[in-house]
Image (spheres, rainbow, N blue to C red):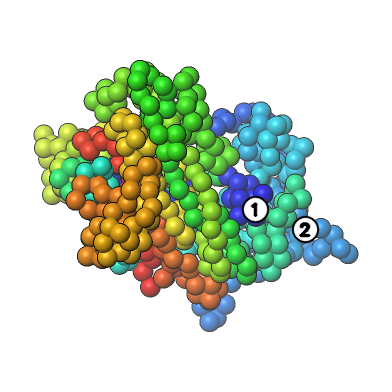
Amino acid sequence: MKLRFIAILLAAATFGVVGCGDDITNIIEEVVPTPTSGTAPPVTATPVPPTTPPDGTPTVEPVCRPAEGGEAVVCGDGDCVAPEQCDIGGICVGGDNALDPCTGPGDCTGGRCTVVGGQAAGDGSCAANCTLETIRTADYGPGTGAVVQTLSFAVPVPLTGSQTFQAGVARSDDTIDTNGETTFRAGDYPIIAKAPNIVIDPASVLGLVCACVRGIEVPAFGAGNSSTGLISCGGGQLEDLDYISTQDHHTDPLGTFVPNAECSHDPDPNCEAEFEIVPGVVSRSCREQEDAECNEPTENRHAGVCNSPRNLTFSGSQAAGAAIIFQNTAIGLLSDRGECNMDVAGMDPCPYADYGPDCVPCTDDDLDKGVPENNPTTTGSAAAIVYNAGNRANTTITEGSGTPCDDNTDCTETVCGISETCLTAADDSMICGLRCGSLPCQTSSVGAPFTCSLLASNPTGGLGGGAFAVAFPSIDAATIGDNVTSVRFAFAE
């Protein structure tokens, strides 16, 4: 297993933060399993919070006992040994006593003892590499936004807001867990985000809905955490940063439906397929108008049709500053023609029923708060595809190669059996691709690595210039049907 997956999977994910996503994708994403009773093992470490020297630069000083003559330093065993700055043990992920505290593999029955970040340690909090965390905050800057791509048209969605992470200190040695595996390399920054710290302003999907994004806790990521991941600054490549997220509208062979085998998920006649996004989070198939999460006839209008789980395929690598996190969000969609109207606050009766009693969009009393969905968020590239879109065989929402062209003779590739053509993109460039309406389909986004020297010199910021990309498919979205949302979050300098 590649180290990137070891780090993320053991910590167990992008923000899925735009107009048409979580509450309309018709997939069941469960946080599993539920906690059971158990006796917590003893915790012996007592770390101290960061101190601030006279020059005003926050620092953290190791307070753990020194290692004794070649002693192995094990993160998560509850014994705080330098260069650790804290060690409060871990939690069991999976198995019969999931989410119980643990200090070694023997404490978890059928699961894994996993160190998670963001957990209280003295007056501070402890990261997944057993260092004290600092708070890193940045606003979203120019280049932040989303595109909701349907079969016929694309809707640009401006995004504003901010992100607050809790990040550990980059250690000078590799972090070894209680299973004897490397979870973080020297120089890596483990990061988490608490659910309330995803702050996206109400987002107008023009003429359609107001999208409200909420961070949702994933217990397997650590109490209160909605995301987990890392920024790599230790040298070498961080692998598996690029991904494609796919979902198939029709995976059971009902009637005469004959999909293209090259552009479909495997047949699922019993509608029981599942895909593990990260440990503790599973995407499951869902039969429209029958299964609980797929039983809204207004949207799920193809009775009996099985929608697949989302599948993820990873590739690619990136050097210093590369990052990937798995972030859990829910997107509520408020029917207000995309107005996100703050001027009606407190009005009675409220002109927008979906705003709830306070008549304010994107607050706790909204009628639709969305359904949690996990998406990878990466400094690499993110793309998404809907197969058999609109419940029509051999109809796909995907963008094609993007190769520059002068005319159709320059476009020689086929996608799902469809030949690419030379199209004029939104920026007036000519590219080979597939058409969605009058323009090339847009179903991907590209991030940008962070600057390691900025992260090292500014432990409360340092995110400027980096960017995260995310893309996800949606099936039977209200008003617009199947679509792909691609997002880019660029952090302000």
| Residue at the outermost front position | 409
Residue 168 placement, left or right of 371: right
Crowd rating for badge 2 (residues with CA inside 10 Å; few <14, some 14–19, many 20+): many
Crowd rating for badge 1 (residues with CA inside 10 Å; few <14, some 14–19, many 20+): few
Residue at x 85%, y 59% (from the top left corner): 71
Residue 162 placement, left or right of 80: left
Q: Specify whether residue 121 is in view.
A: no
The residue labelled by disc 1 is 2
Residue at x 42%, y 23% (from the top left corner): 252
Question: What is the quadrant of residue 231 in the picture?
Answer: bottom right
Kind of element beneath mark 2: loop
Which one is nearer the viewer's eye here, 216 or 260? 260
From the top left corner, tell me how far across and down residue 120 is, in percent. Answer: 58, 51
Residue at x 18%, y 42% (from the top left corner): 208
| Residue at the outermost right position | 69
Task: Please state which amino acid type lies under the numbered disc 2.
Answer: Val
The residue labelled by disc 2 is 73
From the top left corner, tell me how far across and down residue 58 is, in percent. Answer: 54, 72
